[in-house]
Every structure is written in structure tokens, then in C-alpha cells.
Amino acid sequence: MESEDDMHDANDAESGDDDFYSGMDSDGDYDYDYGTADYEFMGNEIDDSDDIIDSRGQKSYTILKEEDIRQRQEDDIMRISTVLSVSREVACLLLRRYNWSVNNVHEEWFAHEERVRLAVGLLEKPVVQSSNAKEVACGICFENYPLDKISAAACGHSFCNTCWQAYVSTSINDGPGCLTLRCPDPSCYAAVGQEMIARLASDENKDKYYRYLLRSYIEDNRKTKWCPAPGCDHAVEYVVGSGSYDVTCSCSYSFCWNCTEEAHRPVDCETVAKWILKNSAESENMNWILANSKPCPKCKRPIEKNQGCMHMTCTPPCKFEFCWLCLGVWSEHGERTGGFYACNRYEAAKQEGVYDEAERRREMAKNSLERYTHYYERWATNQSSRQKALADLHLMQTVHLEKLSEIQCQPESQLKFIIEAWLQIVECRRVLKWTYAYGYYLPEHEHTRRQFFEYLQGEAEAGLERLHQCAEKELQNYLQAEGPSKDFNDFRTKLAGLTSVTRNYFENLVRALENGLSDVDSQGSCSKTSSSKNVTASSKGKGGGKGKGSSKTGGSSRNLDDSGNWACDQCTYSNVKSATACQMCQNRR
């Protein structure tokens, strides 16, 4: 197997599974080191890089435009009509019944044709024979009408066109149930198909009906779903069982195909549902009330203390005056009880254990609220940063890229590395946002796993900030330049390198979190190797290690590759041998 030092070149965008953390030292503390190979995200097999390339190049879903959906729907209808030798209208009714599955229609029709006809409402012959009379009574309004003002479904039950129009219009306005419309006669199950709709419905109602029919092709099919983005009319066909549920519509909106929430890797759908419910539930309001208010001893309404004095007066009509600390009547307080800003009654009662339970509950509520606030604020901050990055990306694509091309005298095709950087920033902000929901639900008693997660999260945040700052602030120097800059190619190398390093790190982070941080067990050791670093050091001293040394006392020489370049400990960028500081993140060698 090749040395890990050969994998640290940041310009190799697909270098894949770098080592991003190491084990614990002999004292039991974490020794985080990019250069060591004690613990790895995915086993760090060199062949894994090919898998990463393949996974990036392949999609497990197809974006369907409205015209694509109509064409597919029409193809399925014609296929059923041809194979079963039925009309287009009947084929459409059959497909609707069996959720637009051509195979299911074939199987059921050839196995139990009579049962299918009964279920769908397809009659082989009319129930009521047509009359030769010049006028026929309507079965709804009971008025007599000439034959040209009377209509009937396949069953033969006659109703006037006016009643039919009202019946059809009401059904369409009631919603998609109009797609399974039956004869108005209560005892009849005959289906009313598109032919009657086209002849009797108004233009507006016909548009609604055909819109319902189109939407049913997507909504009744277990392999397709609409893009949930506002105003988007595209659908996504997903290959079930193909892996990640994250899909990106052509409108640029990314969402989870399984739960239709926004894309949320590495967090599973169940955790996302709990997090969203918690953000919108009243439980947090109650926690805030419990943590920051006390009930009036008389009327029990919650009261928030907004001044320094302990003398509280409840709002009218109660107007009860009491002490905030001990909830006792204020008239019994004075200098002998400690004055206005202290209450020795409370302190004495607390020592006796009188307030232990109430204070314990209030303290628990306050801690719970503070913990939730910590994670929610960072979740929301990364969400707002992502929205800002999306706006900056749009501005870059529509305005700045053309301007930069003119200033630097380079074609826009050679500036795509900037767009790739911004796309990576947007994606990383999304991942980082959901790591805070992941951290909130990580069991508090698993201290080693939590400590390890927080380290990985912190490194991811630091790396993303370096990339974001480079793309946002350093780029401004070249946008504001009066002519071509001599160091623009150096900037290109730096930004492309940071993009590659950040992408690889976040890919490994996502895989690690999706695996439940399986590299770390509850005892604080790694499941793959021994947790004792001195054991690792001794084995490497005998020539058994993968790298060229991993102890911190080895200096930067542990990261030298065959050409003499050295990899930065902080961002893994490959620097020339003569450089004393990393050209990417300015970290000293």
C-alpha cells in the first residue's frame, strides 16, 4: 500500500479518504494529527478513491419536466390500450386504479378481468336500455328533455346536460376525487371517463381535471415525487435502493427524496423530524416559562422578574405582593429577613431542603433551554450563512464572473473554479448546519464520542471558514483591480486547493457521522486499532506503520513525500520543500 503522505496533495481533487484524526496518547487525551494513520474514516484503502469518483459521477435519480411527464403518461396509456385492446379512456381508468403501474394492470387484467372491471367501473353492456321516446325524464331534476339535451354514461342512466354539468363541476372543484367519478345514480358503479368530462365540463374545469390527472401520475407512483421547492413544477424519479436519498432538482433545490425535507445528510430522517418538531413545538415555550418565571403564590399565573428588587406585585386583579426568592408574603419581609435584595428565609429553607425539588426542576429546565439554544443558534446561523452564500453564488454567476474575465483577461471557462468553490461552500454550510442537530441528539453520557464529534465538527468549521474567506474576501482584490494581476494564478491554485481539501474532509465527515462515529467506542478507544499511542509508535518504530512517522516529536519531516514536498498539518495542502509556512492557510511549518 502506498504511503499516506502521497495522498496529501490538495490539487488532487479526488484524493479521497485522507486521515483526519488520530488516537489517544498514553495519558488518555486526544492527540489530533493529520499526518497519523491510527484511526481512519473508511479504512483508507487507496482503491476507495475510485469509488468516490464513481459516486460523484453517477446519479440515482432523473429530473422530469412537465413535458417529460406528459409523454411518459401518454406512452403508458397507449401501451395498455394496445396490449389489452381497449380504448384510450379505459386504459387511463385502469392505470389510475393501479397507480400507473403497467405491470400491475397486465397481471390483474389477465388473471381476473371480471374483478378488475367491477373495481374500475367498466361495464360490458348498459344497465338501462335506451328508449325510442322523443323525450326522456332526467333522473335528478325529473324534468322531461329532448334526447339532444340528455347524456348518459356507459350504464345508460339518463340525466339532463344541466344536471350533468353541475355534477361534474362540483366533483372537479372538490379535488382529485373527480378522477374516480362514478354515475350519479346511487345504485350504479359505472365510471365516468374523460370523454364525458371533455364534453360537459367548462374550459376552466377541464384544465383542473387534466392537471389532477397529470399530478396523479407522479403522486400515485412510488418511484416519483414532486420537487417541494416553491414554484417548481419538476418531478424526480428515484431508483429505490440506490443509496443516498439526497437529490438536487434542476431548479437547484436539494431535498431528501424519502421525507421531502431539505437535504439533511448526515442526519437521518427521524432525527430531522424530531428537530423540526422541536423547533416549532410549544415545549420550548414552556421550558422558557419554567426556567425564567415563577408562579404567583395566589393566582398561579407565571411572572417574569424584570427588575432587581425582590418585591413582586402580581398584575390586576390579583395584585398579590410577594418575595421572588421565597414566594412568601411581602408584608413579612423587612430588614430582619435580609432586606430587599436578599432573603435569608430562602437560604435557610434551601438548606433545610424545602425548595430542593422546585429548584431542581427549574435548574433542569434552564439547562435544557440553554443547551437547545446553543445548538439552535448555530444551526440557524449556518442556515443564514448558506442563504447568503447562495445569493453570492448567483451574483458571481450573473455579474462578477464576466467582470473578472474582463479584468484578468481570461475566458470565463477558466474561471469555473470560483463557481465550484461557491457551490462547495453552499453544500458545506448545509452539512455543517445539520451536524448541530446531530450533536443535539448525541447521548450526553457518551463523553468520548461527543468529544470526538466536537473535534471533527470544529475542524470542519475552521476549514470551511478558510475556504469561505478566500472566496469571499480575497477574491475582491482581483475584482477591484484595474488590470490583470500577476498572482492571479497563485490565487487560482489556492482556491482550487482549498475547495478540494474542504470537499474531501466534509465527505469523510459525512460518512463518519452516518456510520455513527463507529471508529470510537464508548470506552474511549478506536474499534479499528489500539487506542494507546505508544503501542502505535513502537510498532512503527519496527517498520510496521503505514506512514513515515506519526508522533508529534517527529517534526514536519513526517509529512515529506518522495519529491520533498511537505503536507500542512492543518489543511493537508502540499507545499514546496523550501516553504516555511503553508501557502494555503499560513500555518507555520
Image (cartoon, rainbow, N blue to C red):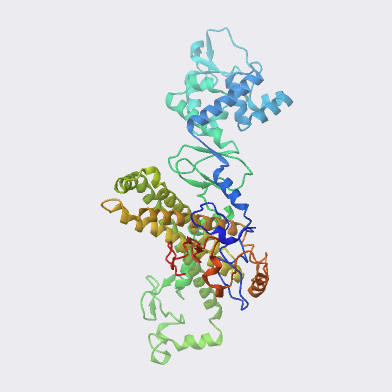
Is 23 rendered above or below residue 107? below
Q: In which quarter of the image is the N terminus?
A: bottom right
Q: Which image quarter: residue 517?
A: bottom right
User: Residue 17: x percent and y percent?
Assistant: 58, 57
Is 529 rendered above or below residue 126? below
Is 443 rendered above or below residue 210? below
- Closest to the observer, 408 or 244: 408
Looking at the image, which residue sits at the far right? 111
Q: Which image quarter: residue 507?
A: bottom right
- Closest to the observer, 398 or 222: 398
User: Residue 347: x percent and y percent?
Assistant: 48, 87
> Which residue does the image show at 52% across and 85% down from the upper left?
350
Question: How many marks on residues?
Answer: 0
Q: Is residue 211 left or right of residue 24?
A: left
User: Residue 573: x percent and y percent?
Assistant: 48, 60
**Res 202 seen here:** yes
**Res 170 seen here:** no
